[in-house]
Amino acid sequence: MINIPNLIFALVMGFLMSASITLATTFVRIGAVENFFWLWLEVWLVAYPVAIVCILAYRPLATKITAAVLEKLKN
């Protein structure tokens, strides 16, 4: 179930991660061209909603995997 804190977390984390990753990959792909910002923005506008959906979908699984790994490390 999506609650407000999880949604806000997904929005913030999705923004930070998608902005960082698309900025880096766009720069590596095309370099410092004159219209870099607009090209990056075009890519980011696709990546941001995808990131939000992925965070909301994968967070429960990632939490379970993290707990299992930590339990193994404790033993």
Image (spheres, grey):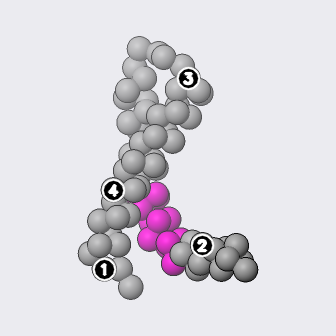
Left or right side of 70 for 32? left
The x, y position of residue 62, in whole percent, is 57, 72
- Disc 2 marks a residue whose amino acid type is Thr
**Callout 4: 10 Å neighbours few (<14), some, many (20+)?**
few
Q: Secondary structure at mark 2?
A: helix
Residue tagged 1: 3
Residue tagged 4: 12
Residue drawn at point x = 38 percent, y = 36 percent: 41
Q: Residue furthest left?
A: 4
- Camera-near label (3 vs 4) is 4
Magenta span main SS:
helix
Do residues under tags 4 and 1 come within 8 Å of each other at their CB atoms?
no
- Camera-near label (2 vs 3) is 2
Do residues under tags 2 and 4 come within 8 Å of each other at their CB atoms?
no
The x, y position of residue 9, in whole percent, is 34, 64
Residue drawn at point x = 59 percent, y = 27 percent: 29
Q: Is residue 33 above or below residue 17?
A: above
